[in-house]
Amino acid sequence: MKKRNLSLLRLLILVSFALFTSCTNDNNSQDYNLEGKYTHSIVGCDNNGNAENNCVEFIDFIDNSNVDVLIGGGDIVYRTKYTINDNKVQLDKISGLNFDISYNIQNESTLNRIEDSGIWVKTK
């Protein structure tokens, strides 16, 4: 009887261990704290003093799902959602931002925009 109880206990421990070790993080990415603002200077940009044309783009990570973005030299800041998967940041398309915006995370202070290889550096 003791031998049977011991075998059942071993089986229970083995099954528990297997379940515990099979749990994974669904996004397969490291834990990065991206909160803050990243900027990128547009190469060859000259706004001729026009405040509606920006030569510096930014992406400001507000929390773990929302971001403000000023991109493409315009003057409108858009708020959208983002996801991180496999060390890649993907912004959701919304009205006004209906094109792909995604970044590879190099580290917590540097992002590399996938669409144009631009380097975005954390400023705050």
Image (tube, rainbow, N blue to C red):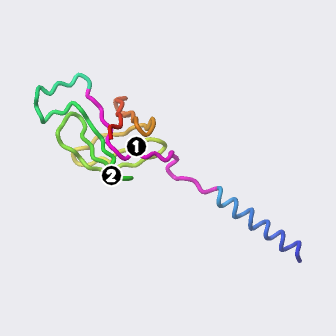
- Amino acid type, residue under disc 1 in the picture: Val
Q: Residues within 10 Å of mark 2 (few under 14, many from 20)?
A: some
Q: Which residues are magenta?
A: 22-42
Residue 83 image position (x, y, % from top left): 40, 49
Q: Quick one: quadrant of the C terminus? A: top left
Say left or right for 46 vs 63.
Answer: left
Residue 30 image position (x, y, % from top left): 51, 45
Say left or right for 20 vs 77.
Answer: right
Say left or right for 72 vs 9.
Answer: left
Q: Earlier in the sequence, mark 2 or mark 1?
A: 2
Residue 89 is labelled as 1
Residue 48 image position (x, y, % from top left): 11, 25
| Residue position marked by numbered label 2 in the rendering | 66
- Amino acid type, residue under disc 2 in the picture: Asn
Residue 1, above or below 110: below
- In the image, residue 24 lies in the stretch drawn in magenta: yes
